[in-house]
Amino acid sequence: MALHQHRHPGMSFAGWRKATSATTSSGHTAELAAPLAVARIAATTRLLTSFTFLWAFGDKAFGWGYATPTGKGWIDGGSPTKGFLSHVSAGPLENTFHAWAGAAWADWAFMLGLLGIGIALASGVALRAAAGAGTAMMALMWAAEWPPARHLSDGTLSMSTNPLVDYHVLYAAVLVMLAVIGAGRVWGLGTAWRRLPLVRRNRWLL
């Protein structure tokens, strides 16, 4: 089965409309998923992931009463990082995270990261930058929770469900996947974004 490659990196699903087929070793014909359907699934995944980041930003910024109590939002003088980082109780970076907790630079970096990644995913632009920033954020959050630890620093069980692969790793993998396949071209502004002269000169902006 031949796939027509475009001159720009990443797979383009939008132009393919028909399902393809392949012949198995037993001689039977197996129908493969239509590329357009796959592209729509990827776009749906992108939009759902964007909502996750944007909701986290909104709740921490305005205190919607879920993870952040009402009146404790960033605009009310609360710190988006203090509660989480000050309670880190495992891992080699425990003291480092305690020192970062509540710092203005940490609050701004975290909130701008959530907002920027969420907007990039929602619009379908700059997915490579979003994947890089998101992966870095997920790596730090993974290190803060430190799933490999069986016990916390006070000796109690960590209750870790998996010592290596948790939801932070999955989020990072999803972000990288969306960037690699160019998931912003369906239900997003990815195609128009790629045509901009600035983006053409700087491929990392894709």
Image (cartoon, rainbow, N blue to C red):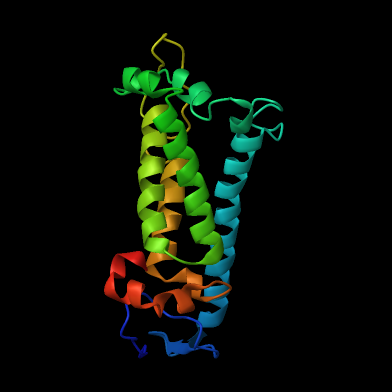
The residue lying at 34 percent from left, 86 percent from top is 6
Q: Is residue 86 above or below residue 138?
A: above
Can residue 3 be seen here? The reply is yes
Left or right of 89, for residue 43: right
Q: Is residue 93 above or below residue 184?
A: above
Left or right of 6, for residue 71: right
Figure quadrant of residue 169: top left
Residue 49 image position (x, y, % from top left): 55, 54
User: Farthest residue in the top direction?
Assistant: 154
Figure quadrant of residue 88: top left
Residue 77 image position (x, y, % from top left): 59, 25
The residue lying at 46 percent from left, 18 percent from top is 86
Location of the N terminus by quadrant is: bottom left
Can residue 147 be seen here? The reply is no
Query: How many numbered discs sit on the rendered protein?
Result: 0
The residue lying at 35 percent from left, 72 percent from top is 199
In-front residue for pair 121/29: 121
Q: Is residue 35 above or below residue 140?
A: below
Location of the C terminus by quadrant is: bottom left
Residue 135 image position (x, y, % from top left): 37, 48
Left or right of 107, for residue 199: left
Q: Is residue 108 above or below residue 98?
A: below
Residue 147 image position (x, y, % from top left): 40, 30
